[in-house]
Amino acid sequence: MIPRKTEDGRSVFLRRARAEDLRRIQMLYAEVYGANYPMPLISDRPRMRRAIESDRYYWLVAESRGASLPTGTVDRRGRIVASLVYQLDPAQRIAKAFGAVVSKEYRKQNLANEMMDAVMKELTRGRGAVDTVYATTRTVTTAPQRLTENLGFAKLGIFPNAHKVFEHETHCLAATFQPSALKRRKSPPVLISELAPLYRLVSKEVGLGRALFQEAPVWTSPTEQPPFPLEAILAPHFVGRRFDRRGSSGVFGTSFVPFHEPNLLLISHDQKTEVFVHYGAMDHYSVILGGRTPLKDYSWVLNSAVKALNDMGVSYIELLVDAYSPHLQRQALEARFLPSAYYPAFRRVGSKRWDYLIFSRSFEMLDFRNVRVISAYRQFLKEYLRIWQALYIDMAFKSA
């Protein structure tokens, strides 16, 4: 427990969350987001309890004792005024920071910064448990971006229309690295030439050195083959067990998405093609986690999965592709997935750490009037728009 005083003299204690905090943590998120917070971890109490009691989570809260309640009474038990969650993957030595929230009346007390810094020091210097930590930040204000920037996070990309809270929001990706992680990078990456601007932006942040860029044919229109039908099985336990048992192969052989559990299976009528997906019904967000197929045409499989997901109401899809398979990068582009971020040293493979590209596809109209980003992220946004125009507009004029 870390005691501290706010600027106005109130006592606040930073400590690990406990099972008895569940209701008060939910009240905090409800205060800030109402009923719009899309994360099941917060709305599902049994799931919250398991996370708090698990050694794969580090859940930190700030408790203000003797605080005044909205009713005018004094809460002697203590009020949860801030919350922050870190999820850990010990095998991959990676962590994800998320769910940072601070009560409105405590937002000028630097609590989020202190909480993130305290956990970062514990995980990296204290325990030496992780090589890299990442976080996504909202863009309704620049404060979350400046918070991660002040803590030494490198800027890696931007995801337009990624999540729906009150409306569809653009999120930024940032990460911090231990020096040993970058030293173990598999280098050089092999990328298609269209990815050079994105790679250069991230290299300015992290110092990546050279990459090999392969000349590739000019973009053509997406495959003329119509998407083949895929049936959807939404059954989290069944899908999760099947994914663990069967894994990924073929064009999905190097798929890797930590901290996402498959809950949706898309399967072809002949049962030869399976695509495992993390599907968020509340915010219409999904991530393709892996799959199995005898087909070599990755773009055809992706287009078929995209149609099935879009028919279910999904408005945003993410896809991760390793930085050493230019043929997969090319086919992701042909399926109209746009390169949105580049994560160096993301995955642990033997004694090396592999770089990965995060592609995204949005079905929402691009509207950045309410997006607030600091200068470096503005460059990522411009690059996203450049490649969006090349793929969705310029190509149409070329084929006319």
Image: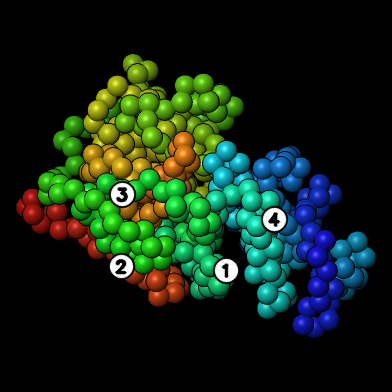
On residue 382, which mark appears? 2
- Amino acid type indicated by mark 1: Leu
Viewer-nearest of labels 3 and 2? Answer: 3
Query: Looking at the image, is mark 2 or mark 4 earlier in the sequence?
Result: 4
Q: Looking at the picture, tell me which residue is in the foreground, 209 or 398.
A: 209
Q: Dot 3: few (<14), some (14–19), or many (≥20) neighbours within 10 Å?
A: some
What is the spatial separation of the Cα atoms under label 4 and label 1, in whole angstroms? 17 Å
Is 137 on the left or on the right of 74, as rendered?
left
What is the spatial separation of the Cα atoms under label 3 and label 1, in whole angstroms? 28 Å
- Amino acid type indicated by mark 2: Lys
What kind of element bears circle 1? Answer: loop
Residue marked by disc 3? 188
- Name which quarter of the figure residue 231 lies in: top left
Relative to 368, say whether 360 is above or below.
Answer: above
Q: Residue at x 26, y 37 (%)?
A: 299
Q: Residue at x 83, y 81 (%)?
A: 9
Residue 274 on image: x %, y %? 39, 25
Residue marked by disc 1? 151
Q: Looking at the picture, tell me which residue is in the foreground, 320 or 313.
A: 320
Residue 289 on image: x %, y %? 44, 36
Viewer-nearest of labels 4 and 1? Answer: 4
What kind of element bears circle 2? Answer: helix
On residue 264, which mark appears? none
What is the spatial separation of the Cα atoms under label 2 and label 4, in whole angstroms? 39 Å
Residue 225 on image: x %, y %? 18, 32
Outermost residue to the right: 76
Tags 2 and 4 touching, CB below 8 Å:
no
Residue marked by disc 4? 126
Q: Looking at the picture, tell me which residue is in the foreground, 130 or 389.
A: 130
Q: Dot 4: few (<14), some (14–19), or many (≥20) neighbours within 10 Å?
A: few
